[in-house]
Image (cartoon, rainbow, N blue to C red):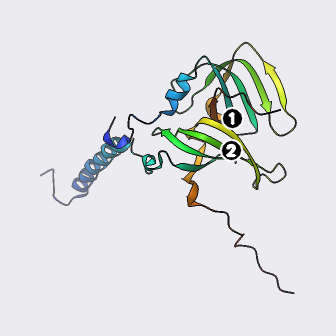
Amino acid sequence: MAANASTNPSQLLPLELVDKCIGSRIHIVMKSDKEIVGTLLGFDDFVKLADMVLEDVTEFEITPEGRRITKLDQILLNGNNITMLVPGGEGPEV
Amino acid sequence: RKFRLGSPQGANGLRRRETSLLVADKEKKKKESILDLSKYIDKTIRVKFQGGREASGVLKGFDPLLNLVLDGTIEYMRDPDDQYKLTEDTRQLGLVVCRGTSVVLICPQDGMEAIPNPFIQQQDG
């Protein structure tokens, strides 16, 4: 990496943190009022996009009521609308 | 003679060379961010996202694409009636990764404060 990339070994890289989360629960917050909780199976190499594959997924719609849909059997989540990722998160309190 | 000093041909040739130098320069500088986030490491920052979400937390890490790692993150919830008004409502999120593609603003937490609306016209009588 070039010297001006300003990464020092003592800091935590975001994608490293997501990588460590593979195999455990993750709570994903979208740009809209939607949140996804599931087990992270992996994410793709497109650093800009980061689509995610999740399993045993619960989808939460924040504004109307609480829990919306419970899905199983793996989903591919489009990285376009992902705002925050919370490793080990259990989702919103309902 | 094919080549004349000061001719449009000569001038274009020079511009072409300058342009290719500029492109090469830009490619070298592509990874350089205009904001040096390393000075905010271990400090509390406020982040605003596309879609109106706001959060603050201690910056633990980042990459050139502006993905962030925040610790002790608090999300500020918006008023369901007025999407632009922040309520007192917050929720704790802990250690989070913020997607750089979604980030629109970063500032130090103690670098901003809420002020009364300066644009409201004072109406007399």
Percent position of residue B57, x then y? 59, 45
Amino acid beneath label 1: Val
Q: Is residue A47 visible?
A: no
Q: Which residue is mark 2?
A: B75
Front in this rendered view, residue B122 or B22: B122
Which residue is the extreme one toward the top? A73
Q: Which residue is mark 1?
A: A29
Q: Are marks 2 and 1 in contact (CB under 8 Å)?
A: yes
Left or right: B87, with B30 as reference point = right
Percent position of residue B48, x then y? 63, 49
Q: Is residue B3 above or below residue A36?
A: below
Front in this rendered view, residue B6 or B124: B124
User: Label 1 lies in what chain?
Assistant: A
Check disc 2 and report its element: helix, strand or loop: strand
Q: Is residue A37 above or below residue B73?
A: above
Check disc 1 and report its element: helix, strand or loop: strand
Q: Is residue B73 above or below residue B14?
A: above
Q: Is residue B21 visible?
A: yes
